[in-house]
């Protein structure tokens, strides 16, 4: 009987070790990624850490620690799409397993990640994220801006083509004026929103007004997108789709929807700011600056707003 009890005790004590075992190959990759990051080689660190994280899918705490280092390497490598994708994975792990909040991470890494989140992730998205990431929404972002590709110099202007001299004998051929084109038929009246579409938009408004999870925000964008595409004449649907796209970092979609419906008035400073950020992240620096200047007089300032103001207006 004592031998049986001893065997059970050994199994209980060793179970966590067996469950938390990670193949040494992936631990070596993690170590290589950390060393590459410390040497100032972010691209090499990103490659090693991405593979290392793949081997830790069954260990939420270890995976969260690996993803944190991966996000910091992606920031150094100016891989902002990769950084945002890694943040989405961290949010999902935290929502399901509290992997990030329980991960064994040095305090300086958590602080560094919070600064990068404040610089690269919209404050409303952070505020709707799990509690472990919400403090980053009010954190002063790092002033170090990622390098942006230099603008290509304009092509040299071609010399104007020389107009051949005409002699008095030359005549200009006159062609008969074509008859005016027939007027197009008047557009059909837009179909009104159905009750189901109105319900979708109401659900989107509610979701955007609450601290929803990332998965719920993506669902809200899908609903708003469906209604906005079916009713391009609906200004409310376009703006809801644009705000929802902004909240999930779909920059190109956000810029497209926010500019529909006769554009945005100055009385919507937050939407104008969302448009400015979306245009900036999509590569339209001039459009971003124009939208931002319209929003600033009536916009409530925050560290996140100030960070993007420096980025956009310094171009």
Image (tube, rainbow, N blue to C red):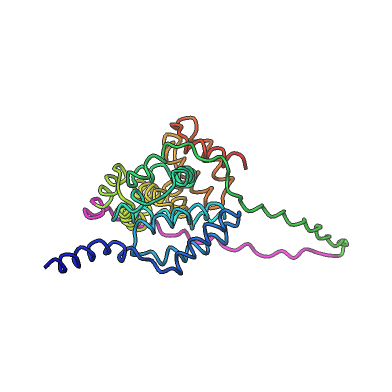
Residue 268 in the image: above or below residue 249: above
Residue range of the region highlighted in magenta in the rendering: 170-199
Given the current orientation, which residue lies at the most extreme front position? 2
Q: Position of residue 289 (x, y in %)?
A: 56, 41
**One can see residue 263 in this view:** no
Looking at this view, is 244 or 57 the one in front?
A: 57
Residue 30 sits inside the magenta stretch = no
**One can see residue 123 in this view:** yes
**Which residue is drawn at the image coordinates 31% and 63% (left, top)?**
17
Query: The N terminus appears in which quarter of the rendering?
Result: bottom left
**Which residue is drawn at the image coordinates 53% and 62% (left, top)?**
32
Please identify the dominant SS of the magenta region: loop
Query: The C terminus appears in which quarter of the rendering?
Result: top right
Looking at this view, is 125 or 255 the one in front?
A: 125
Given the current orientation, which residue lies at the most extreme left position? 1
Looking at this view, is 129 or 235 the one in front?
A: 129
Q: Position of residue 74 (x, y in %)?
A: 52, 55
């Amino acid at each position: 009987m004592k031998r049986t009890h001893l065997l059970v005790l050994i199994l209980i004590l060793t179970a966590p070790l067996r469950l938390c075992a990670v193949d040494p190959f992936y631990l070596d990759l993690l170590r290589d990624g950390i060393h590459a990051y410390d040497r100032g080689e972010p691209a090499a660190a990103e490659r090693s850490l991405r593979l290392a994280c793949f081997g830790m899918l069954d260990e939420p705490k270890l995976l969260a620690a690996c993803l944190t280092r991966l996000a910091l390497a992606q920031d150094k490598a100016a891989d902002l799409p990769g950084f945002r994708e890694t943040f989405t994975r961290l949010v999902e792990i935290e929502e399901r397993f509290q992997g990030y909040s329980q991960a064994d991470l040095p305090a300086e890494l958590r602080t560094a990640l919070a600064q990068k989140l404040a610089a690269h992730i919209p404050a409303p998205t952070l505020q709707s994220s799990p509690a472990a990431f919400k403090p980053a929404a009010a954190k002063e972002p790092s002033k170090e801006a990622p390098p942006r590709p230099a603008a290509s110099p304009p092509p040299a202007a071609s010399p104007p083509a020389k107009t051949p001299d005409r002699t008095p004998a030359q005549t200009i051929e006159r062609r008969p004026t074509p008859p005016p084109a027939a007027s197009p038929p008047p557009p059909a009246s837009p179909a009104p929103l159905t009750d189901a579409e109105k319900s979708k938009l109401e659900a989107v408004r509610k979701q955007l007004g609450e601290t929803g999870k990332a998965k719920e925000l993506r669902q809200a964008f899908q609903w708003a997108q469906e209604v906005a595409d079916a009713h391009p004449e609906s200004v409310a649907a376009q703006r809801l789709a644009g705000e929802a796209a902004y909240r999930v970092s779909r920059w190109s979609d956000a810029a497209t929807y926010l500019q529909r419906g006769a554009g945005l008035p100055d009385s919507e400073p937050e939407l104008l700011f969302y448009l400015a950020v979306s245009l900036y992240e999509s590569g339209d620096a001039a459009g971003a600056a124009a939208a931002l200047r319209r929003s600033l007089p009536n916009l409530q300032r925050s560290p996140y707003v100030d960070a993007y103001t420096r980025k956009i207006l310094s171009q």
